[in-house]
Amino acid sequence: MINNIKVKTKTLLRAILFVFVGLSTFVSCEDQLEEAPESLISLESINENTMESLILGMYESITRERNRSFESRYLRLLELQAEYQWGRGGTRTRLSNYDFNGASLSDKQTMWSSFYKSIGRANVLISLINTTEDLSESSKNLGGGEARFFRAVMHYQLVRIWGQVPLRLEPVKDASQADLALSSIDNIYASIIADLQFAEDNLPATADPGRATAGSAKTFLADVYLTRKEYQLAKDKAKEIIDNAATYGYELVSDFSSLFSPTAPTNSEDVFSIKFAQIIGFGNFHTDAWAMREPRVNGVRLGVAAGFSTASAFESGNANPASTFITGWDDADIRKQYTLVDKVTLPDGTEVDVIPQVTRDIDLDGDGTVETERGLYTFGKYRDPGSPGEFGSGNDFYLMRYADVFLIYAEAENQLNGPTQSAIDAINVVRDRAYNGSAPDLLPEEIASKEAFDDRIFTERGYEFVQESKRWFDIVRTNRFSIISDALKPLGPNGDIATNPYWPLPALETSVNGGL
Amino acid sequence: MKEKQPFLKFTFLFFVMLTLTGYSQDIKIKGNVQADGIPLPGVSIVIKGTRKGTTTDFDGEYSISGVNKGDVLIFSYIGYETQEATVNNQNTINISLIEDNSQLDEVVVVGYGVKRKADLTGSVSSLDAKAFDLQPVTTLEEGMQGRLSGVQVVQSSGQPGAGTSIRIRGVASLAGSSEPLFVIDGIPQFNSDVREANGLSTLDPNEIASIEVLKDAASTAIYGSRAANGVVLITTKRGKTGEPVFRFSSNLGIQSVRNKLDLMSGQEYVDFVTEYYDNSIADGDLTQLDKDQAIQEFQNAGIANTDWQDELFRSAIRQNHSISVSGGSETSKYFVSLSYLDQEGAVLDTDFNRVALRVNLDNNIGSRVKLATQLSGSRTFQNRFVGNDGTNNTGGGKNGIGSILAAEPSIAPRDADGNLSDVRPYSFSSVENQNPFGYVEATDQREAYRFQGNVEARIQLLEGLTNTVRFGATYNNADIGVYLPSSLLITPQQASIQSRKDLNLLVENFVTYNKQINDNINLNLVGGVAYQNEISDRFSISGQGLPDDNLTINALQALETVSPPETNKVEQTLNSVFGRVNISIKGRYLFNASVRRDGASQFAKGNKHATFPAASLGWRISEEEFISDESTISNLKLRASWGQSGNQAILPYQSLTIGESVNTPQGNGIGLNSGLAPNLPNKNLTWETSTQTNLGLDFGFADQKYRFSFDWYTKTTEDLLANILLPLSSGFSSIISNVGEIRNRGFEITAGVDIPVSDDFEILVDANLSSNKNEVIKTNDGEDIITGGSNDRTGATLIVREGESLSSFYMIKFLGNDENGNPIFEDVDENGVIDGADRQIVGSSLPDFVYGINLTANYKRLSLGMNWQGVSGLTVHNSRLSSFVGANPGSNKRSDLRDFTPRPSVASAIGGRQSDRFLENASYLRLKNIKLNYAFPTEKMKGISNLNVYVSAQNLITITDYSGYDPEVNSFSGGDLRQGVDLSSYPSVRTLTLGFNLTF
């Protein structure tokens, strides 16, 4: 028995040892629980390569499908607030009638979200540049310049659409830092100007397509000055760009339609644009959003026959027949021929009239009775017959092109000194291109006074930038709300948009941001 | 190298084990104890008149030393008649015990061991293979439905091979998963493997020996950090000693759509559109111009009368065959099975098929080592109808079933030339409409290969002391291929392939010690360690523009444009130590305690480890002396348990500061550039912890002919993993955090009765009823979490709000139509505008009751089985209904549209906006299965031991008020907060089956 017990004890000890060995080998390996992701990049610190990737990542949030900003909503929503646009259906109708509260929340919210996502990424980048010692000073300035440029451009969109907004200049590192109060419009502009000034000093004169340059920063700066009514600063900055155009490679392209090519990577007029590729998910939706919705004519879809789009046809809006901007547009203007469409040639050669799909009850002829009127034209600035499908059109979207600079100069100079020859020369650079190199002279009454010429410049900006989402900002900036009622559009159901021309803050911001 | 560590360790351990070879011992008797050929573990063996004794091991084997000739061994096991055997000259004594009464002594599998039902102190529901014989099921989950108390099984749709969600005792997670942990033959499966890849659909139900569902924390805590939603243990069949037994079973079924929806005919649709224009013109909302255009368009296209459902639905064949052989010697046993399932869908061009092979082996290596090996492989192939498995979140006409329901009935499917017709011939046609035959031509297939192999070595170190080493590997490879042909209008000629590979490795070592300390006290100890690791690889590529539709996904190099391919590799690791003590005193007082400590890679540094304890008590009153042996009470037991378990089902790397690769055309203009998007890590991320208390009562009398069981539980889950909202201006929309608390509280009743009517007629009834009440106790700062709404096109939102049930629908409330037939909604904030601010809680998709009734009647050689199954007190959002009864023309409508929208017009079209009028009571009671079986007399059939022929019907009767295809529907996957949503889901089918089982 004693022997038996001994054996048992010995075996038991072995067993205990066995379990102990097992325990120690498996469980003591704490490093097994360390995560080492192989498909992701650690951002504890950065180098030149990761900095470059982070810059591209910053742009990504506004170029991608489904964030629904520049690839569809920015154009659709803001353009519909032009007096010459009639929106078609639902939220588009409400926005074009300035019912900011009634229009879909999610449409506006996703724009807000993608702008701030970009700003957030820019702030992470700026912070990493500041905390990484290994980066060279020139890299820091280059990366910091592009991040600040981008942050300024995004804040510039926000402040013009929503007015007072949170001014984000620091990255959010945990939930406790997420709340932030609104800043005053003056403070937001001060930050935008400071960021753009840093960028113009540190960015290169030229860069890859769609990347910010010193010229991009200066042009935005001129535009911001104009918005702030700092006419001398705006004029000087515009003149600086024009005088140094060769440095930045800026020149108006002679063929207006080639500006909107779905395949060209860039052109000499491109100051800063959002780039789209003919790849589904990385292209724009503009072609589909504005293509004729009318069903097949002789078995052919009009949007396809017109070379607008290959997939869908949403016809987001039509030209307002009560708008003198539309009805007074000279047929000889190449820009009108390109942008406003009322006829389509089918593949068999027959030409058919487009039936615009928006109808409204208005008193167009002023006889005191309301009648049903149809929209005049569909808009055709973005066409991509080679698009692979929805969200796959390659046309870029300009935030600034060289034509902006001349029109900024003309407007600022006129505000300072009246319709001087240099102001007239500047507007004519843009007009000449629209008339194959030689535009008819401006009428005497158009240059009779500062006010008259200012009106003329406003109209010219419309012709040049229709479908580029600048009209609404111009109306607000120059306080021209009267043209809206002149064009028989209601000024919103909730009172005077002139005193509060801003969209309400998105619900997800107001409900979650404890700083508001 | 790091990945190879487990192999090395395993090898090392194996050699350690081999050194523990034999040691000298005195005279000894060995043998095995079994009942009906099934080994009985835990049988007590005592030398009469002494305190010396032992117990049988997992395989019913025992050995006892120090025995003298003439000694008498007493074999006792609760529930079995005690036997004595006198020792003569033999070394081996094999004993076959005879049952005292049934059921109580069934052995159930618990984590890292087995237990008799009578000794259970926690809450465990179990099913054995017989339950699967009761109905010709094709998946494991189907066989579980309605048969286990506290378990809710919901199929996502009627599509063959569709996913299923399983809920044990309610839902308790926000960003984590609410699915239970599945353990197949001892190998815990990673959640994504089972659910996301639908891994269970690869198992043939014929291979299953038993399913045990561990529900209370005392039962689940041994699985620690993954057990908060319960544990489902799946055990496959094994060979038994004896001649080879062949079993062949085969059945053939014919399936048809259970109920068609009553939609408009072509003329009804034209009349409706005309009425819409007339009413709207009268209201001044539309003009005569608009109506003239519409009428002209009808005339141009010609008015057909197409029943799109009839065009696309069919009677479909299902066949299922399986053959198995099992047998073996004392030292070597085998079970081999091969099965084939081929199931057509009731919608054209959909099907599911599966080939599964399994080899289970048991070998004795010497006298001390037993090796159990399980090898299985399967291939499944599913043809889907584009976007209908619940993972696709487009609705409307942009998916297969949606396109059938949306297509306007006034359009013929094909034009005069036989080409697919344009399904948007009218300017009011919805731009989402697609010709459903375009989806028939489309490809949407899922092909999955799954291999699982595990080897378990059980080494007897001492009497009662066994060490088990378990090594397991699961490999899963699934490819999803989608091609949309040129006949579709939106994104035609688009091809994509998504591929995933998962490799899951497990190494476990645990020691089991079983000791009969004296006549009164039995001790059982388990202690061990585990290491599990999973590496997942994802690859996807998509592009557009194929020269020929026939190439589908088989020649992506022919695509005109290709998006950048994406690859992603994710790894996660779990390290564990666990232990358990079971003490049984006099077979009456049962005590059980367990603990597991887990370390998981996906949590933040410093938060990677957690401990999950549990304890339980049982009192078998029926074994007390004051209950006389003559009493009719055969079982009376009180149970109480408390414990904690966790949930770690979140994605890895969320606590690290990282950048994700993204693409942008910026900086290029034509092609793409790659950039980095920084994340917002949570450096404090840790587990969800569930604390559960369970009280139970088991009661049976008349030899368990009448049995009843009741369980009450309350389960509180804290530190919920949730995506908490951040202000959008922060640059991030949410951050995953540990916030909030949810409580599930409820009860479960099971009852059964065997009614022996006469010698050759008996009726067996088993029923179960479960009720669970879910309440969100706490959210982050009391904030609501709102999900859904925009992207999924349901327009429905669900809300997580303190004091309410999870999965509460949050919508505007429809009050009725006014005298003009225009809808009125409740203006909660009374500001005159109906918008998001007017939403309120209007229902929950969680049921009040889940129940099942199983009836078996055996008369001579005939048996009739019925499986009734139901849920009650829940709502489902029938999202399609909004376009079926909304006044906007553009897609097909229900024939009874005017019951909802009496006066179709522009003004009344707002009635189609999502509101609580599209929430429907989805309670149902269903005769899930009825089966009539005849067992042939085989005495005179040479070589045949069993022959059964049966006829059966599934889904024969469904009693429900739900107006969609089926009340059992869940279009979003189990990990989503949007539960109880029906997004034009695949219709359910009724199946008639003829089949036989043959054993020889």
Image (cartoon, rainbow, N blue to C red):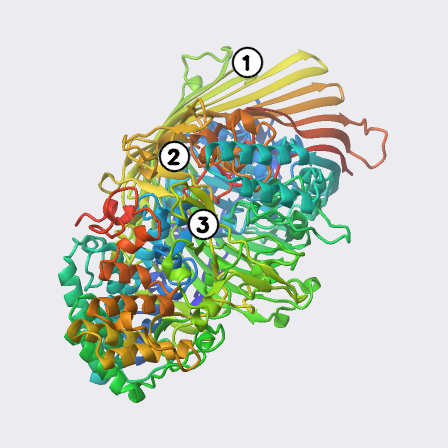
User: Which residue is rendered at x = 70% and y = 20% of the image?
Assistant: B858
Mark 2 or mark 3, which is nearer to you?
3
Badge 1 marks a residue whose secondary structure is loop
Q: Which residue is mark 1?
A: B702
How many marks the image carries: the answer is: 3
Location of residue B48 with respect to B532 vertically, above or below: above
Counting from the top left corner in percent of width and height, residue A103 is at: 35, 46
Quarter of the image for the C terminus of chain B: give it. Answer: top right
C-alpha gap between disc 3 and disc 1: 77 Å
User: Which residue is rendered at x = 66% and y = 51% of the image?
Assistant: B422
Q: Which mark is residue B901?
A: none
C-alpha gap between disc 1 and disc 2: 54 Å
Counting from the top left corner in percent of width and height, residue B916 is at: 43, 30
Q: Which residue is mark 2?
A: B811
Residue found farthest to the bottom: A246
The residue lying toward the viewer, choosing from B874 and A59, is A59
Label 1 crowd bin: few (<14), some (14–19), many (20+), radius 10 Å: some
Residue A328 appears in the rendering = yes
Quarter of the image for the N terminus of chain B: give it. Answer: bottom left
Give left or right: position of B98 versus A153: right
Counting from the top left corner in percent of width and height, residue B936 is at: 80, 27
Q: Which mark is residue A88?
A: 3
Which quadrant of the structure image shows residue A321? bottom left
Location of residue A204 with respect to A82 vertically, above or below: below
The amino acid type of the residue labelled 2 equals Met
Location of residue A171 with respect to B768 vertically, above or below: below
Counting from the top left corner in percent of width and height, residue B970 is at: 51, 39
Label 2 crowd bin: few (<14), some (14–19), many (20+), radius 10 Å: many
Badge 2 marks a residue whose secondary structure is strand
The amino acid type of the residue labelled 1 equals Ala
The numbered mark, 1 or 2, whose residue comes first in the sequence reads 1
